[in-house]
Image (tube, rainbow, N blue to C red):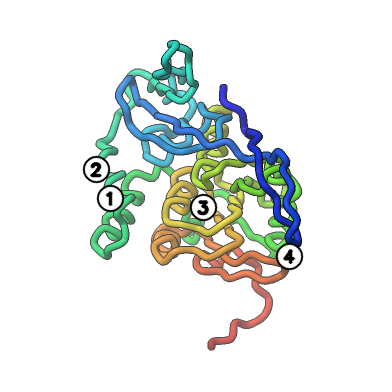
Amino acid sequence: MGRVTERRKVIRIRDGALSSRPDTLVAEEPLEIRLNGKPLAITMRTPGDDFALAAGFLVSEGVLGERSDLQNIVYCAGATVDGSNTYNVVDVKTAPGVAIPDITLERNVYTTSSCGLCGKASLDAVRTTARWAVDDTHGGDAPPVRLEPELLASLPDRLRAAQRVFDRTGGLHAAALFSEDGELLDIREDVGRHNAVDKIVGRALQSGLLPLSRTILLVSGRASFELAQKAVMAGIPVLAAVSAPSSLAVDLAAETGLTLVGFLRGTSMNVYAGEHRIALRAAATQG
């Protein structure tokens, strides 16, 4: 199993003075995900929670939705000179009867979603494959999630305080799952923020906790379309990011009823969609 961190020699320059010392770096290795024995995707990730990453990835693709959909996940032998296992290939076996959609076409759409037509196709793909609705504006058995701005403002510091590997490397993204009351439920770190989210969602699937209908997902960077997609596919009603969202992420949030918060820093934040879940007291002013 690959390590989360590795040591490398570095030359430090401080005020013109040179010194040599070992530095701790975040590990980055490829992970090939196979579905029922067939190659599906390769992602660069920080080793650890690989099974959860693969399961979460397949939740976002609409393949898995509950624990019973998953038969098992195993490591496959990697290609090494001596024949040893690299632990960089996993095979996800679905339970009998689980329908396998044509996800190859969908992933091509997602990864080329810079044009208007492709963006529309991406929005349609998420809407048609999502198992749970995050839009609670039309009523239901449970009251909608309602968040105080002060609670949201407290979450980035709690995320940062829980980033153990970041403290040693300074090179990892993080995703954290909070309850609507602000309780930290899970946190994962990875060289890719989308992988950190997949690890959280995959762990929830393995524990039988999907949909995550009364939770908040916080990411350490920006909110891309892909991250908004993953939140919707996991039934998460609120996505918050410390940086900016993309335009397509905002479109997806507005389309599905996802609450999307960006630039969550200190006591400030921007609410791009789903403002009905935020307890806004002051009247909004238009600029």
Say if residue 174 shows up in the picture.
no
Identify residue type, mark 4.
Glu
- At a point 61% along the width and 54% down the height, the residue shown is 220
Residue depth check, mark 3 versus mark 4: number of the one nearer the observer: 4
Marks 1, 3: nearer the viewer: 1
Q: SS of the residue at dot 2?
A: helix
Q: In this view, does 158 lie to the left or right of 121?
A: right
Question: Which sits earlier in the primary sequence, circle 2 or circle 3?
Answer: 2
State yes or no: discs 1 and 3 in contact (Cβ < 8 Å).
no
- Image height of 268 relative to 110, above or below: below
What amino acid type should be assigned to the residue bearing mark 3? Gly
Q: Residue 204 placed where, x, y %?
A: 56, 34
Identify the amino acid type marked 2: Leu
Q: Please give the residue where the numbered disc 4 appears in the rendered image.
A: 150
User: Which of the labelled discs sits on residue 215, or is there none?
Assistant: none
Which residue is identified by label 3?
Answer: 140
Measured Cα–Cα span from mark 1 to mark 3: 33 Å
Cα separation between marks 2 and 4:
42 Å
Would you name the residue on which mark 2 appears? 105
Choose the circle earlier in sequence order: 4 or 1.
1
**Can you give x and y, in whole percent of width and height, for residue 276 in the image?**
56, 66
> Residue 219 at x, y = what percent?
58, 52
**Disc nearest the viewer among 2 and 3:** 2
Seen in the picture, residue 205 relative to 267 is either above or below; the reply is above
Q: Is residue 197 above or below residue 63?
A: below
